[in-house]
Image: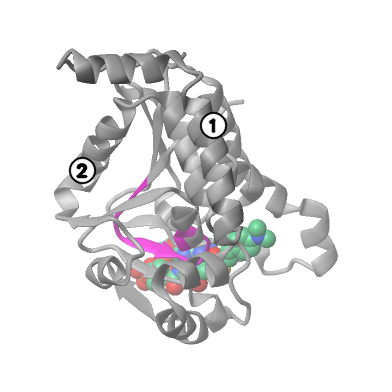
Amino acid sequence: MNYEFILVTPEAKKHIALIQLNRPKELNALNLQLMLELKDALQNLDKNDEVRCIIITGNQQAFAAGADIKQMESRTPVDLIKIDQFETWDQIRKTSKPIIAAVCGFALGGGCELAMTCDMIVAGESAKFGQPEIKIGIMPGAGGTQRLTRAVGKALAMEMVLTGKFISAEEAQKAGLINRVVPDEVYLDEALKLASEVATMSPIALRLAKESVLKSFETGLQEGLYFERKNFYLTFSSEDQKEGMNAFVEKRRANFSGK
Ligand code: DAK
C-alpha cells in the first residue's frame, strides 16, 4: 500500500518504528484514507520481528485535530454503518506491540481518542487534549467517553465531554491521562528515549504484559488476575525468560532474541 497521509520509518532507531501523521495543512485531521493507511502500517509493523515498539506522532502544531469534519459533514447513519470505521479503529487497538503517542499541539476528538488508544503518551508542553465533538452537535465515537473517563475520572471527563473544554499537557499529566510533559523541542526525542527503554525488553514479555494490562479494563479483579497468571506462566516458555534470568545471575545486560 502506498501511503499518502502518513510517513512510516520502520527503523527510526533500533527496534523502533515511527509513524508520522502527515496532513499538516488540515492539522492532521483523520480522514478515512489516513485511518486505513494507519491500520495497514500498524498491521505490517506488528508482523515485523525487527520492530519492538511503535511511536505515532504528528507535528509541533497538531497530533491530530480530530476526524475530518468536512468528510463527515454530509454522512447519514447508513453511510456510517456501511463505512464501518470501527473495524479500522478496532484493528488499531489490536496491535500487539507497545505504541507510544508522541503528542504536540492539538490532540482533539478522534485525535485524543487515537492517543488514548496508544499505550503511553509523551507530550510537548503546548499539547492540548480535548473532546470537542459536543460543539459540532455530536459526541465522542471512538472511545472518548470510555477511555477518558477511566483515565481521568468522572468529574473531568464529564466536563471535557459536555463542554468541549481543552486541557493542557500539564493538566493532562496531573489527571493521569499522559505519562510525561517535556519541552516542545524534545517531545519526539523523549518519546524515542522511552521507546528505546521498552525496546530493550523481551518482545514476548512485552506483548503478554500489554495484553494483561489492557485486560484490566475489561474484567473484574479475579478474572483479570487469572488472565495475568496464564500470561505469567507463558513467559516461562520463552528463551527470553532464560536469557533474562541468566543475565541477572551473571550480572550482565540481557540480550533478548524474541524467542
Ligand atoms: N476536520 C477537518 N478540517 C480541520 C479539522 C477537522 N477536525 N480541524 C482543523 N481543520 C482544518 C481547518 O478547517 C483549516 O482548514 P482551512 O480552512 O485552512 O482549509 C485548517 O485545518 C486549520 O484550522 P484552523 O484555521 O481552524 O486553525 P486554528 O488554529 O484557528 O484552530 C482548532 C485550531 C484545532 C482549534 C480548530 O481547527 C478546530 O476546532 N478544529 C476542529 C476540532 C474538532 O472539533 N475536532 C473533533 C472532530 S469530531 C469514529 C471515530 C472518530 C470520530 C468519530 C467516529 N468512528 C470510529 C465511527 C471522531 C470524531 C471527531 O474527531
Magenta region: 101-112
Q: Which residue is mark 1?
A: 41
| Residue 5 relative to residue 196: left or right | right
- Residue at 48% from the left image edge and 34% from the top image edge: 232
Q: Position of residue 53 (x, y in %)?
A: 39, 32
Name the foreground residue: 256 vs 142. 256
Q: Is residue 193 above or below residue 51?
A: below
Q: Position of residue 68 (x, y in %)?
A: 57, 60
Q: Which residue is mark 2?
A: 190
| Residue 103 relative to residue 83: left or right | left
In space, the residues marked 1 and 2 are separated at their CA atoms by 22 Å
| Residue 59 relative to residue 226: left or right | left
Which of the 4 image quarters holds residue 143?
bottom right
- The colour scheme of the drawn protein is one colour
Q: Secondary structure at mark 2?
A: helix
Label 1 neighbour load within 10 Å: few <14, some 14-19, many 20+: some
Q: Quadrant of the N terminus?
A: top right
Q: Is residue 64 above or below residue 4?
A: below
Residue 201: in sight, yes or no?
Answer: yes
Q: Is residue 218 above or below residue 76?
A: above
Q: Secondary structure at mark 1?
A: helix
Which of the 4 image quarters holds residue 176?
bottom left
Name the foreground residue: 68 vs 100. 100
Which of the 4 image quarters holds residue 209?
top left
